Image (spheres, rainbow, N blue to C red):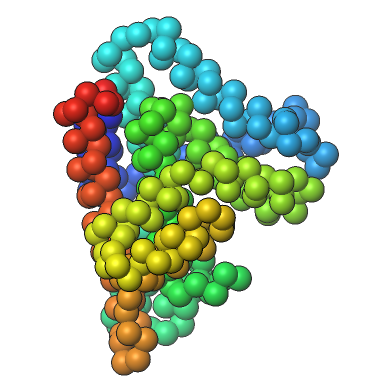
Amino acid sequence: MTLISLLLVLAIERATNKTTYWQSGFYTSRYAAWLEKHDILSPDTSRQVLLAIVLIPALVIGLVLFQLDAFFITFIVNTVVLMVCIGCPDLRQSYRGYLQAASREDTEASVLYAEQLGYPCDSGNSLGQCLVWVNYRHYAAVAIWFVVFGAAGALFYVLSAYLLRYLTQHEHQQQSNWMQVMELIDWVPVRLHTLGLLVVGHFSRGLTIWLEYFRETSARKMVTEVAQAAEYVEPEGIECTDEPCTMVRLVKRNMMALLVLVAVLTLSGLIS
């Protein structure tokens, strides 16, 4: 069931442009507005309340599905929730726009699209590394949490990531504390994801960095640095689309590897 949901959602997400009602941002922004209206999310909100904000919706959907214990309903709910949670259509459009602008040598438009994709950034990442991070945050991490915890896991991760963006935009006093929480939430997924990057990329070249960062480093740094080592592109004499396109191909291979792993775990009976 998990594998079928993943395959179905990824196929639909790739073949179509999701409308507003199928995007997580539509619901997370309204959830935040409701919390603000009831003074639950305010400038002095504590970390404990923030944890409750992301945990309660995930626990509710998990408990409801557990109590129903209906295979078909669980499959439908899991698929619908995953469809809403995974991906980011706006960033996909920005990437396509960047490629089109670069192909017609429109430097100004290319720069604008690159800025929408998070480049340049304070981390000093290349555009390709920014794309790898976007893929992890909006695809890989959501998929991993979904495989382990179903719809509740995907919802929990998306709410947690959105809350970090919200706190950052509002310069909330709990911003740094929630960044630490997100590092804990990302700890296992980011190491599984980067291990996959090694398997589908240059394993020996990236293994040293993976081992160096294994115990303690930021999720973004581990993802971007391992990706760069696993799929290195010479900086001299390349087109402006070569490096980002190469990185995108790497993360696509990694997603295929994840699907293969889920298939193996399904056939072995370790996941449903």
As drawn, which residue projects farthest toward the left? Answer: 267
Number of marks drawn: 0
Which residue shows up at 64% across the image and 49% down it? 179
Name which quarter of the figure residue 250 lies in.
bottom left
Q: Position of residue 154 (x, y in %)?
A: 44, 34
- When the figure is inspected, residue 68 is found, relative to residue 45, above or below; the finding is above
Residue closer to the observer: 119 or 132 = 132
Asked whether residue 26 appears in the rendered view, the answer is no
Q: Quadrant of the N terminus?
A: top left
Which residue shows up at 35% across the image and 8% down it? 69
Q: Position of residue 44 (x, y in %)?
A: 83, 39
Q: Position of residue 150 (x, y in %)?
A: 38, 27
- Side of 231 where 116 appears, left or right: right
Which residue shows up at 48% across the image and 55% down it? 214
Q: Position of residue 101 (x, y in %)?
A: 35, 77
Residue closer to the observer: 255 or 215 = 215
As drawn, which residue projects farthest toward the bottom? Answer: 237
Name which quarter of the figure residue 149 lies in.
top left
- When the figure is inspected, residue 77 is found, relative to residue 158, above or below; the finding is above
Asked whether residue 24 appears in the rendered view, the answer is yes
As drawn, which residue projects farthest toward the right? Answer: 44
- When the figure is inspected, residue 132 is found, relative to residue 215, above or below; the finding is below
- Side of 199 where 147 appears, left or right: right
